[in-house]
Structure formats: C-alpha cells, structure tokens
Image (cartoon, rainbow, N blue to C red):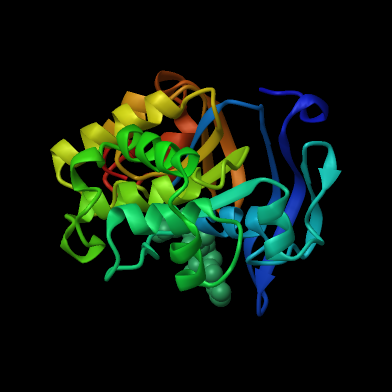
Amino acid sequence: MNSESNSQLALCDVSVSFGGFVAVSGLDLAVDRGELRCLIGPNGAGKTTALDLICGKTRVSGGEIRFEGRPIHELKEYEIARAGIGRKFQVPSVFRELTVRENLQIGRSHHTGVFANLVRFGGSTDDNEVERLAELVGLSDALEMAAAHLSHGQTQWLEIALILAQDPALILMDEPTAGMTGQETHKTAELFNRLRGQHTLIVVEHDMGFVRDIAETISVMHQGKLLAEGTLDEVSSDQRVREAYLGSGGIGHA
Ligand SMILES: Nc1ncnc2c1ncn2[C@@H]1O[C@H](COP(=O)(O)OP(=O)(O)OP(=O)(O)O)[C@@H](O)[C@H]1O
C-alpha cells in the first residue's frame, strides 16, 4: 500500500451521508502519480460516490482529500478540474452534431463559446494535437465524421480524447467499458495501457476481464470503506472480498 504522504491523491477518513444514509464511511485511499488504479466492489459499495467526492461533485461530510499535497475537498468542482483532475462520466457529453475533429478542437481550447472556438482554430499546432489525440484513441479515420454517427465505443473514446485534450494529471473513469462490445472493450484496454504512466488513472469497473487486462493495484470497496487492496490474484483470493461479493455471483461476475 502507498504511503499517503507521498501520494499524488490521498483520501483520509473520508465520509459522506445522504439524508442519514452513509454511502462512504472512513474511506482511506492513496494513489501515486502515474498509477493505473482499478476501483472495484459490489453494487452500492460507494465507488461512484468516491469519484464524485474526489472531483467535487459531492461534498465530503468528514475527512480530507489531498491532491498534489494540497487539500481539495473544499474547492469548487471547476477549481478541482483546474487543479488537474478530469472526470469521465458514464454518459458522454460530446457535441453530436459536430465532427470528431470539431469536438477535439473545442476540447483543446481553454476558452468558452463553442462557435468562437471553431472560428479561431486552424493553426497547425492545434491541428497536429487534434490528430495526435485522434490517433491515440483510434479515431484517425473518423475525424470528419459527425459524432452522432459514431458507434457507442467510438463515442466513449471521443469522450476520453476530450478529457485528454485538457491534459489532466489525474483522470477518473466511471465504468468506461459499459455497453461496449468485446472488441471495443479490448481496444479500450489497449488505450488505457498506452495512457499508463502518462496520467494517473482511477478506473471504476465491473468487467473483471477488462480489469485483468489493465490492472496493477486494485482497491476493493465495500459498504463505503476500503476492504482490500492488492493485485487481482491477491484480492480475488481474499476471503473478505469473496464474502462481500456473495449474492452478486462472485467477483468474476461483478
Ligand atoms: N445522491 C444520493 N442520494 C441518496 N443515496 C445515494 C446518492 N448517491 C448514492 N447513493 C447511495 O449510496 C450508495 C453507494 O452508491 P454508489 O453509486 O457510489 O455505489 P457504486 O459502488 O458506484 O455502485 P454501482 O457499482 O452499482 O454503480 C448506494 O446505496 C446508493 O443508493
């Protein structure tokens, strides 16, 4: 396990309740720079809520979250994004009527105003960066295609490219392979392996085949707490983890 003091991200004794229901309770989690951390756990374990707390979508009721050595749990969502934390939600937020290229051009811009951004673009540095991002996520052949015509998997990759366009130090991904075909899931694992080390990634995922393809350290949550941490083999042979997954068909069927 990482030492919290040296970690890029550290959650220390973090809790949150919703109208009396404790969704996250005394959660400790530490992630090092450049790590690809998988966060798993049975339904309702508090995984999405943990991501919500890190990115400021939900406020902690207790405890502390530190990023790059600085407390962030009292910052506003946009301030946390500016500090270098990007979040991919389950529902993509691409501009469906615009092409992949136009989406990426907007994603590259730090200015607001969609059409103003389109007009001011066209410089070769930005073009190169847009093409590099498209290649990274496997969308080079789809650059001139309207986002509305992309497959589900391609739309998710475009969403990932839009987050990468902001170059966040830490990226939070909530079930990135949900609804993908087996082939799309495999390509997503390849993409994550390419991103490994360049950004810190925290990936909430139920697909254990995908987790096996990308995993280094796995953190297992149960009932709002960190239950176990280790390699996939270590956590899947942990008796407490097996018990937590009872009733959901076991860890392999989470
Ligand atoms: N805004 C909210 N208001 C009330 N309860 C909530 C809220 N958000 C989450 N919860 C509850 O907190 C618990 C943890 O939810 P969360 O979505 O974080 O779990 P999860 O581990 O991501 O589950 P899953 O794998 O099913 O997505 C659940 O019991 C959920 O119903």
Q: Quadrant of residue 150?
A: bottom left
**Vertical placement of residue 173 versus 186, above or below:** below
Q: Nearer the viewer, residue 136 or 86?
A: 136
> Can residue 40 be seen in this snapshot?
no
Q: How many numbered circles are shown?
A: 0
Residue at figure coordinates x 58%, y 68% from the top left: 112
In what quadrant of the picture does the C terminus appear?
top left
Residue 246 location, x and y as percent? 36, 45
Q: Nearer the viewer, residue 169 or 115?
A: 115
Q: Residue at x 57, y 59 (%)?
A: 49
Up/down of 38 relative to 198, above or below:
below
Q: Up-down: is 97 above or below 5?
A: below
Residue displayed at 60% across by 57% down: 110
Residue sitting at 32 percent across and 52 percent down? 101
Q: Determine the image quadrant of residue 198.
A: top right
View extreme (bottom): residue: 19
Look at the picture and state if 79 lies above or below 227: below
* Quadrant assignment for the N terminus: top right
- The x and y percentages for residue 87 are 53, 53
Q: Residue 56 location, x and y as percent?
A: 68, 61
Q: Position of residue 189 (x, y in %)?
A: 31, 31
Q: In front: 191, or 209? A: 191
- Is residue 240 toward the left or the right of residue 75 in the image? left
Q: Is residue 113 visible?
A: yes
